[in-house]
Image (cartoon, rainbow, N blue to C red):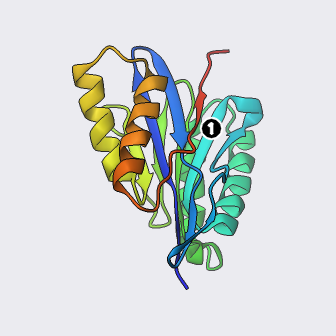
Amino acid sequence: MKIRSTTILAVRHKGEVAIGGDGQVTMNTSVMKSDAQKIRPLLGGKVWCGFAGSTADAFALMERFESMLKDFPSNVPKAATELAKQWRTDRAMRRLEALMVVVDINQTLLLSGTGDVIQPTDGILGIGSGGNYATAAAKALVQHSDLSAEDVVRESLKIAAAIDIYTNDNIKIHRVEKD
């Protein structure tokens, strides 16, 4: 039985940072949930994490990542790199199936179980079943509109929902605020 879910999109634009996701969880050919929360605050909302993949695996990874953030509170890339090293080398963690997008006021990062910690050049990052659609829409909107980062995320996720059957338009968006 294959469970599919999620489109997560992070956008850095005009000095703003926003991350958003849809709420759909699909099992085989049925929508099982339409209002899942796939973006979570870490460190009291200073860092936001969105996930795609197995929910239990993603929560385990977020807990470990938050622990790393406590060890390196002002250095999100270092915390992400330490988690990626653990994720890749730890025998139990290696089996965790999820991707994470992590944003704070200064960084946008993709973390994967293959040890990747990737920072997109343009500040736009999408993951999940509709991630490529949302990313393409966001890139076009950033280049050809005056929308805010939050509005780019919203409109891009709507476009992804219109294309990808595993993405819905129950969209939740969070802005990353400066201290």
Q: Residue at x 65, y 67 (%)?
A: 57
Q: Label 1: few (<14), some or many (≥20) within 10 Å?
A: many
Q: Residue at x 35, y 39 (%)?
A: 120
Residue 7 image position (x, y, % from top left): 47, 52
Residue 160 higher or lower than 30, as above or below: above
Does residue 125 appear anywhere in the picture?
A: yes
Residue 11 image position (x, y, % from top left): 42, 31
Callout 1 amino acid: Trp
Q: Residue at x 39, y 51 (%)?
A: 131
Q: Quadrant of the N terminus?
A: bottom right
Q: Quadrant of the C terminus?
A: top right
Residue 71 image position (x, y, % from top left): 73, 42
Residue placed under numbered mark 1 in the picture: 48
Residue furthest to the bottom:
1
The part of the image, by quadrant, that contains residue 135 is top left
Residue 12 higher or lower than 32, as above or below: above
Q: Taking 92 as reference, is 130 left or right?
A: left
Residue 87 higher or lower than 167, as above or below: below
Mark 1 lies on a secondary structure that is: strand
Residue 58 image position (x, y, % from top left): 64, 61
Does residue 77 appear anywhere in the picture?
A: no
The residue lying toward the viewer, choosing from 109 and 30, is 30
